[in-house]
Amino acid sequence: MKNIKYILTVLFLSFAITSCEDFNTDLDVDNVEDPNSNQLGTEATAGKLFQNWYVSNNAYRSPSLAMATMSDMHSCSWGNAAMRDSSSEPRIAWNNSDTYSNQSFTNTFFNSMHVVLADANGVIASIENGASFSDNNMVKAMARFAQGLAVGSLAMNFDRVWLSDETGSLNDGNAVSYNDAITFALAKLDDAISIANANTFTVGANYFNGTAMSNVELSQLLNSFAARILVNSVRNSTQRDGLDWGKVKNYASNGLTSDFTITGDGWNSWVSEWPLYSFFPGWGRVDMRVINLMDSGTIPYWVSANPVAPESTSGDARLLSDFEYLNGQNFISSRGIYHYSSYRHKRYDWYISASYEGDYPEMLAAEIYLYEAEALLRTNDLAGAAAILNSATNPRKSRGNLPDVAVNAVDIADAIHYERSIEILSTGSGLAFYEMRRENLLQAGTLLHFPIPGKQLLAAKIDGYTFGGTSGTAGEDYSTSGWR
């Protein structure tokens, strides 16, 4: 894989960040399917399934940065990664042309997820054809995991998905709705959970870059990803209210109790790229809307030509521990001063200092606690939801030193949104976007999901279409309201 760990610093110093440089990374996919053999997928293929999903899902060349900025959780006016196009105001439709300069940020991701799915299908087919692996139950659980992750990731981001499994293409080769794809993904994860719960095995350290995992720990991880996919699949608050929150609660209560991290290897084969571009000095900043949540006296939206705003204060200790105050701007004013911000996220600066080595969080335990708290809120167990938020071990208490949340629905819902904006910022691709989407908080005209990439439409001889601005169905394909 191309090594780009020094490009950030070089571009920052040379001010080349205003251009759309080609930050290409080559996904290391071990696709060794042999149509003339009954072993369609090898153990080497299985060992790379999670890695290939992780690298693709968190890549620079993915929709992650565009979603982070159009959600108004992060802010950036640079033209890279479609950040400027997708977060400029008023919002416009996504350019879904196959010749668009930023088309690769959806197309590469779309292709990569289907490669992960195809490889997982091959591994399952091998097992079904009688192949013998080091531990067939472990390998099958990991392959089902990959099927669920690949399809779930596609369904959270795109309006339609092509499905396949070890039996071949499904639905006569036609794309299905994101809801049907979510159902498919959860079924694969449920199967993986059943395998993990019914058997004893150890997932080798190679699967998660140095961290071995028992079947019990894998089950917790599987339940956590199922909760993430289910909760984040909805496109608006009406769909949110109609979720099976009992199912969410079951997943979350059987999920992680500690952070799930991936050990970086110096930006070689294991790295979560998009967060680095969102907080590296000179790149993205934290949207002022987020700082306003912590200090209501801070402007939530930049309107003054003055590039300096007073430093904020907050009873939340994380304002000082996680955020860095900046007394100037590096964004170009002609691109819209609404991009301006006086803060950047510094919580994970240690990762930069450590040369991209060490344990970067893919999924914080706090993310799972919040799914469970919301499930209790939506099922009218207000006391139970408040108890989770007010626990001494919950970050809003242990890190933020915040007072207890009152036992009422409004305060609990506000606290959950607040924690998702502050505590889990810069973890998990798309989480900021999904949170704003399901709460009807995305600015009017913001797309609610991406169309199938233009290159794929062209190859499949499907008429072109897009979403955003006023393209699509209001409230289903693009936002009509927004936090402002």
Image: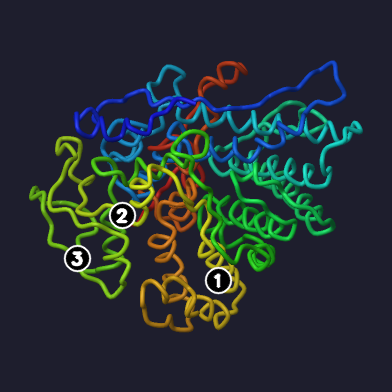
In this figure, which residue is indicated by the disc labeled 2?
346
Residue 445 visible within the image = no
Q: Secondary structure at mark 3?
A: loop
Q: CA distance from mark 2 to mark 3?
A: 15 Å
Dividing the image into 4 quarters, which one contains the C terminus? bottom left
| Closest to the observer, 279 or 75 | 279
Amino acid under disc 1: Ala
For residue 12, above or below residue 344: above
- Kindly report which numbered mark, 1 or 2, lies closer to the viewer in this rendering: 2
User: How many numbered marks appear?
Assistant: 3
Q: Which numbered dot is residue 312?
A: 3
Q: Secondary structure at mark 2?
A: loop
* Residue at horizontal 48 percent and vertical 83 percent from the top: 407
Assess disc 2: are there few (<14), some (14-19) or many (≥20) residues with their C-alpha within 10 Å of its C-alpha. Answer: some
Residue 307: x percent and y percent? 11, 49
Q: CA distance from mark 1 to mark 3?
A: 29 Å
| First reached walking from the N terminus: tag 2 or tag 3 | 3
| Residue 120 placement: quadrant | top right
- Kindly report which numbered mark, 1 or 3, lies closer to the viewer in this rendering: 3
In this figure, which residue is indicated by the disc labeled 1?
373
* Residue at horizontal 39 percent and vertical 40 percent from the top: 65
Q: Secondary structure at mark 1?
A: helix
Amino acid under disc 3: Ser
| First reached walking from the N terminus: tag 1 or tag 3 | 3
Colouring of the image: rainbow
Amino acid under disc 2: Lys
| Closest to the observer, 356 or 196 | 356
- Kindly report which numbered mark, 2 or 3, lies closer to the viewer in this rendering: 2
Taking 26 as reference, is 480 left or right? Answer: left
